[in-house]
Image: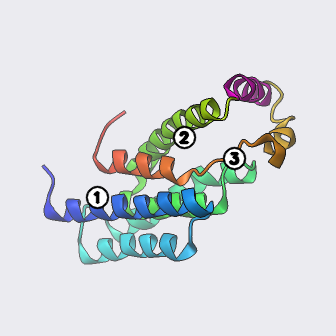
Amino acid sequence: MATPSDLIVLTTIAGGGLAAAAIDVRTRRVPNVLTASLAAAGVAFAVAGIGRLTIAGSIAGIAIGFGLMLPGHLFGATGAGDVKLFAAAGALLGPAATAAAFIYTALAGGALAIAIACRRGRLQRTVHSAARLVASGAANAGEIEAVTENNRFPYAPAIAVGAVIAALGVTL
């Protein structure tokens, strides 16, 4: 059963995720002030006993969130703001829920990628390029990342969906 402090955490994740998604869709950026505020709120909640996390759990959530998203950024699949946003969500979710949120985020991101590829009239090309990416060990990553390919899309909405689903306690 959800406690009032659980609802505070859920509302913070949902509100922060919604704000990040709206800003990312509009500007293609996730502001540092937003991600830092969410991370600080997660640690502050742990210090104050709001929610179920200890301070160590909140900090571990940050580390796990950062660690899970960083490889995608290093390969050019996500922006630095996405990494920081997911790490900040980890501060509110804790380690286990952050790992679950990563899976939900990937699923939401995949659905979003398919919807955007369909809207842009390039689903077949996108699927073919993704298959070549996997088969070649990322040998065509530069080709996929080219600005002329029109493959980029805001990822904060997927992070927001994944984090909220995990905060709701949905199990895999």
Position of residue 69 relative to residue 119, above or below, is below
Q: Using residue 30 as the reference point, say whether residue 57 is left or right of it.
A: left
The residue carrying pointer 2 sits among few (fewer than 14), some (14 to 19) or many (20 or more) residues within 10 Å by Cα, namely many
Q: Amino acid at mark 3?
A: Arg
- Most prominent secondary structure in the magenta stretch? helix
- Residue 131 included in the magenta stretch of the image: yes
Residue at image coords 54%, 38%? 112
15 vs 147, left or right, is left
C-alpha span from label 1 to label 3: 29 Å
- Which mark is drawn over residue 10? 1
Residue to which mark 2 is pinned: 109
In front of the other: 87 or 119 = 119
Which numbered disc flags the more N-terminal residue, 1 or 3?
A: 1
Q: Amino acid at mark 1?
A: Leu
State the residue at coordinates (49%, 45%): 102
Q: Secondary structure at mark 1?
A: helix
State the residue position of label 3: 152
Looking at the picture, which amino acid does disc 2 mark? Gly
Crowd tier of the residue under label 1, counting other residues whose Cα lies within 10 Å: few below 14, some 14–19, many 20 or above: many
Magenta span: 122-134
Q: Earlier in the sequence, mark 2 or mark 1?
A: 1
Task: Rate crowding at label 3 as few (under 14), some (14 to 19) or many (20 or more) other CA atoms within 10 Å.
Answer: some
